[in-house]
Amino acid sequence: MKNLRLFASCLAALATFCLSCSEKKTTEAVITSIDFSDTAYWYSCGDTTQAADVFYVYPTVSTISFVDNGSSWFADICLPEVREEANGNQRFNKMLYGEYNFYAPYYRQMIFEAYSQPTPMLDSLAQIAAKDVNDAFQYYMANFNHGRPFFLMGHSQGSQMLIELLKNGMTEEQRKLMVAAYCIGYHINAEELSAYPEALQPATDSMMQGLVIFNSVTDTTAIGMVSRSDVVGINPTIWTMALDTVPDELHLGMAKYNEARDSVLIVPCPTRTYLYKHNTVCPDLDPEMVFIPAYEKMFPKGNLHFADSWLFGGNVVENMRCRLRHFGD
């Protein structure tokens, strides 16, 4: 799944790029600012062959510890190995959303361990990653978008940063071009929804513009820290907040990388679904599916957080087509 050819072709550019990076890591960001006019800060940009865009922000890809990371809470995007981790995720999603121009910046994301810190410190750290995403988005709008409709797309930490962008970074004119913001694997709490009623407008059907959030579990006991406070979660098999059990034939398949074809395919993954406390329950799936014991406190067995970005791939791709068809109605 790793984009080795692209990685090799970027080595020369990265050598120049990394000269601007600090030699000493700190508890602050590894570099002080990012100039998004430099294409070295983008995994993908410049393709304008399609009628609509995806602005994609990748999830947490670095699990290195704070100590082993040189006492830094941030992934060092100057390092080739960090780029390679991010590229594997971005390449998968560029294939999955290949019907659209794909724009994906690198950003100073928090390492996984940052999420174990007290809320005030975590919020402070998140401001740096959020600033990078906001700066990248503003550069994208000013230089790449050219008035085309666009989707925001993210997962986990990527979705967290897109929500911050929606709350604090987008103008009304920019929102008019947004078809939908798929902020998968994160949450909106009641206080946020009340404080930002225009910026955080939940989509409540399969066609309207707005914010789309979903988190999935195999049973109601597996709801974890990321989604227990969510108030806008939607069922991605029917794109409503109805509580009825949905038959398995409405799950249109999961996205899976096919090494032989070097492509992402939609393959069957039948499961019934229903909403419980704004989480999508998938009772027919194996609770061991993506279970990682080391992360059990945040993601207990049966929590499908690590699968959310591809588990409903067929439904998301079809829904993007639907929302784009009805965009501006």
Image (cartoon, rainbow, N blue to C red):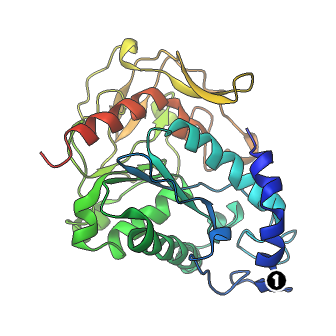
Placement of 234 over or under 210, stated as above or below: above
Q: Nearer the viewer, residue 5 or 115?
A: 5
Residue drawn where x is 31% and y is 66% of the image: 192
Residue drawn where x is 77% and y is 71% of the image: 78
- Residue 134 at x, y = what percent? 46, 73
On the image, which quarter does residue 31 sit in? bottom right
- Residue 308 visible in the shown view: no
Placement of 181 over or under 304, stated as above or below: below
Residue drawn where x is 53% and y is 40% of the image: 309
Q: Nearer the viewer, residue 153 or 149?
A: 149
Residue drawn where x is 44% and y is 65% of the image: 144
The N terminus, quarter of image: top right
On the image, which quarter does residue 323 sit in? top left
**Left/right of residue 49 with respect to residue 203 in the rendered view:** right
Instruction: State the residue lying farthest toward the front.
Output: 49
Where disc 1 sits, the SS reads helix
Placement of 271 over or under 319, stated as above or below: above
Q: Amino acid at mark 1?
A: Leu
**Left/right of residue 34 with respect to residue 85 in the rendered view:** left
Q: Which residue position is annotated with label 1? A: 19
- Residue 286 visible in the shown view: yes
The C terminus, quarter of image: top left
On the image, which quarter does residue 64 sit in? bottom right
Q: Nearer the viewer, residue 208 or 284?
A: 208
